[in-house]
Image: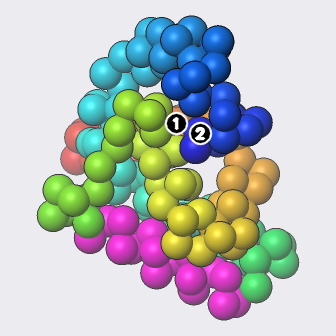
Amino acid sequence: MKIWQKTTTDLAKDTPTAGLYKLVEKFTVGEDYILDQALIPYDVQASIAHAEGLHQINILDKKELEDLKKILNQILTLHKKKEFEITRSDEDGHTAIENFLIDSLGETGKKIHTGRSRNDQVLVAMRLWERDQLD
């Protein structure tokens, strides 16, 4: 399920809007989900830093922080083995990571997005990637 989806039937094949959703998805996602593979390590790094900040302001307790870091590091390991897949239905790497966290940790996984916009995630991951490319 997409993060923006209101119900599980939004994209069901038998609804009148299913075809429209698929066309919009194809147009808006394009090949971004393929290009985002390169940003996964940077997005994970930024997510770990963000989780630590959420812990400092008591949004996450110690166990939640450790659980998130464990799964984020698991994503990084899977990525290095080329086993962490971003699909068109994920739309981007940020959603793929968030979905993996939610699937693994439930409500704790949802907390990673607290106080964080998609634009913030893109900006931070891109800056980390650019810095690495310059080095």
Residue shown at 37%/16% (left/top)? 30
Residue shown at 29%/31% (left/top)? 35
Give the Cα distance between marks 2 and 1.
Answer: 18 Å
Element type at mark 2: loop
Q: Residue furthest bottom?
A: 63
Which callout, 2 or 1, points at the residue further toward the start of the chain? 2
Residue shown at 35%/50% (left/top)? 40
Residue 68 is a magenta residue: yes
Q: Quadrant of residue 38?
A: top left
Q: Name the foreground residue: 65 vs 134.
A: 65
Q: Which mark, by number, is residue 20?
A: none
Q: Residue furthest front?
A: 14
Q: Work out whether 117 lies above or below 85.
A: above
The type of residue carrying mark 2 is: Lys
> Percent position (x, y) of residue 32?
36, 25
The type of residue carrying mark 1 is: Val
Q: Work out whether 22 lies above or below 95.
A: above
Whether residue 127 is visible: no
Q: Work out whether 85 lies above or below 47.
A: above
> Percent position (x, y) of residue 113?
69, 53
Element type at mark 1: helix
Instruction: From the viewer's perspective, tell me whether residue 59 is left or right of residue 26.
Output: right
> Percent position (x, y) of residue 44?
44, 59
Q: Which residues are magenta?
A: 62-77
Badge 2 is on which residue?
Answer: 2
